[in-house]
Amino acid sequence: MAAYLIADVDVTDAAAFEEYKREVPATEQRYGGRYLGRGGTTKVLEGDWQPHRLVIVEFPDMDSLMRWYDSPEYGRLKAIRERCSRTRIIALQGVEAIAL
């Protein structure tokens, strides 16, 4: 069952963030990750949430998502991201498709 990484990234150093942004997709792809949304326009429909740069990545399952997140190749990039942004990240388990 698919799992989703959802991140709200407040970039504090755009120049440093470019390296992270350029290199992270290849690491996600190795674990079956694919972007569903990445830094596009957002519109708050309810509540007081003030999103920054939203990212949604779909992985085949939660295990694949966690193996990517805990991987050495992502660890190096995670350190870069932590230096140049403030980020909130969650992992969300998907639901089984319901036949109609």
Image: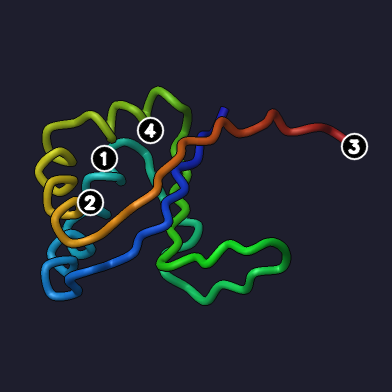
Query: How many circles with numbers are drawn on the protein?
Result: 4
Callouts 1 and 2 close, C-beta under 8 Å: yes
| SS at circle 3 | loop
Distance between mark 1 and mark 4 Cα atoms: 11 Å
| Label at residue 96 | none
Badge 2 crowding class, 10 Å Cα cut-off, few under 14, some 14 to 19, many 20 or more, is some
The disc, 3 or 4, on the residue closer to the chain's N-terminal end is 4
Q: Is residue 20 left or right of residue 34?
A: left
Distance between mark 3 and mark 4 Cα atoms: 29 Å
Tell me the amino acid under the disc marked 3.
Leu
What residue is at 34 percent from the left and 64 percent from the top? Answer: 10
Circle 3 residue: 100
What residue is at 34 percent from the left and 28 percent from the top? Answer: 66
Callouts 3 and 4 close, C-beta under 8 Å: no
Distance between mark 2 and mark 4 Cα atoms: 14 Å
| SS at circle 1 | helix
The disc, 3 or 2, on the residue closer to the chain's N-terminal end is 2
Distance between mark 3 and mark 2 Cα atoms: 36 Å
Camera-side mark, 1 or 4: 4
Circle 4 residue: 65
Distance between mark 1 and mark 2 Cα atoms: 6 Å
The disc, 1 or 4, on the residue closer to the chain's N-terminal end is 1
Tell me the amino acid under the disc marked 2.
Ala
Picture quarter containing residue 86? bottom left
Picture quarter containing residue 85? bottom left
| SS at circle 2 | helix
| Label at residue 30 | 1
Circle 2 residue: 26
